[in-house]
Amino acid sequence: MIDAINPFKDKEIRAFDGSLIVVDARFLRINRDEVVENLMVIFEDRTGIREAEQKLEDERERYDTELEAIAAILKNGPPLFRDFITEGEALVEKLYISLDKLGESDTSAHFMREFHSLKGSARSLQLDRLATSAHRIEDLLIAAREQGSFGSEERQAILKSAGSVKQGILNIRESIERFSDFSGKDAVIDISGRGVGLDVVKDTVRQLGGTIRVQTKLGGGTSFLLTIPLKRGSDRAPAP
């Protein structure tokens, strides 16, 4: 019963210096002759645990966002993302500069429209996580406008979501830079691709239990010899 109404269960306390402290309390009954004689309260500082959990969650979110960016770039091609990156980075910087003015209806309405547009662009490029962060900013601005106030809590929430948008755009930029090492071509054509196809073929052949041989002759070109078993687990010799 006491644990059910425990007011100190993962209680967040703001220290004088502004730092956040997380405490937890356990209540222990001290009985004598089946009568509760005393109640002992044991406090535990869970700040480090909460920080570790948050760090792990942030790393997981970053990993998933990077994978989403890579998949979108492979499907759509880098050129489609260039304007999106430029406009998105500029929008986030404008938001940072205008934080103190977000309580003004005209300013909040402007950024609501801008992040609504960014959300639509992100979804069209299949960047769902980035679109969710942009939508969260849009919702926060709408809520602040309806309440007629923009305080420190709203400010922190806006900064957190804006940071997610900024990180998502940075992931796209870095992924495109990594892919530029494979190919300098802007678009896939009959004789030029992204430069990642051979790596996919290699992995597939190895999964099938096959091998690849590469022969190159100066001025004569390169040939690839793929040897794949007729059937996985078969005792028959592989056919070239």
Image (spheres, rainbow, N blue to C red):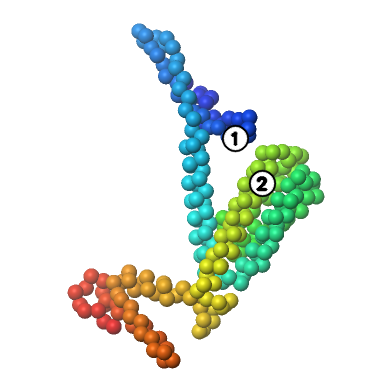
Residue at 75% across, 39% down = 149
x, y percentage for residue 143?
Answer: 70, 43
Is residue 197 visible to us here? yes
Q: Residue furthest left?
A: 235
Is residue 72 visible to us here? no
x, y percentage for residue 152?
Answer: 69, 38
Instruction: Tell me the distance, in whole angstroms, between the alpha carbons under discs 1 and 2.
Output: 19 Å
x, y percentage for residue 233?
Answer: 23, 70
Q: Nearer the viewer, residue 144 or 176?
A: 176
Q: Which-is-in-front pick, marks 1 and 2?
A: 1
Category of crowding for the residue at label 2, using alpha-carbon neighbours closer than 10 angstroms: few (below 14), some (14–19), many (at least 20): many
- Please identify the quadrant where the C terminus is shown: bottom left
Q: Residue furthest bottom?
A: 220
Q: Secondary structure at mark 2?
A: helix
Question: What amino acid type should be assigned to the residue bearing mark 2?
Answer: Ile
* Residue named by callout 2: 158
Which of the numbered marks, if any, corresponds to residue 46? none
